[in-house]
Image (cartoon, grey):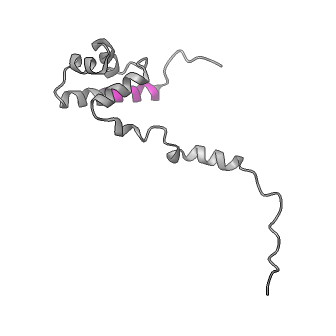
Amino acid sequence: MAILTTTPLEVGTAVAQLGQNLRLARIRRRMSQEELAQACGITRKTLYALETGNPGTTIGTVFSVLWKLGLMSTTTALADPDADEHGKILEAARRPQRARQPAADDNDF
């Protein structure tokens, strides 16, 4: 399996947008980076990396910050299997087909 050495453009853009969103949420709550970082058990440098779109920030860190900002409910749509239309199509294609037709209904009384 090949290891990606660069982040795909779409991923980089999404990470940067998430960082900007988290920064705005922090500022709206009038929290400093230091305050939020301490509350999440991370360093200010790690929070800065997250807010500036560093794709190396761990998912646990992201969820800790979301939790502290009161935004955990916004994560329920992430990778929601009910919204995965492509996956549903693939799953349906793998379902076994009926081997035979149902018996004729000749039970008329």
- Residue 16 visible in the shown view: no
Residue 14 covered by magenta stretch: yes
Look at 50% across and 46% down and name the residue there. Answer: 83
* Towards the viewer: 32 or 52: 32
Look at 43% across and 41% down and name the residue there. Answer: 77
Give the magenta range. 10-19
Q: Is residue 67 left or right of residue 108?
A: left
Image height check: is 97 above or below 75? below
| Residue at the left extreme of this rendering | 30
Q: Is residue 1 left or right of residue 102?
A: left
Image height check: is 36 above or below 101? above
Image height check: is 34 above or below 23? above
Q: Is residue 4 left or right of residue 96?
A: left
Picture mark count: 0
- Residue 64 visible in the shown view: yes
For the C terminus, give its image quadrant. Answer: bottom right
Q: Position of residue 30 (x, y in %)?
A: 16, 27
For the N terminus, give its image quadrant. Answer: top right
| Residue at the front extreme of this rendering | 109
| Residue at the bottom extreme of this rendering | 109
Q: Position of residue 18 (x, y in %)?
A: 35, 29
Look at 71% across and 50% down and name the residue there. Answer: 95
* Towards the viewer: 35 or 89: 35
Corner quadrant of residue 17: top left
Q: Main secondary structure of the magenta part?
A: helix
Corner quadrant of residue 2: top right
Q: Position of residue 78 (x, y in %)?
A: 45, 38
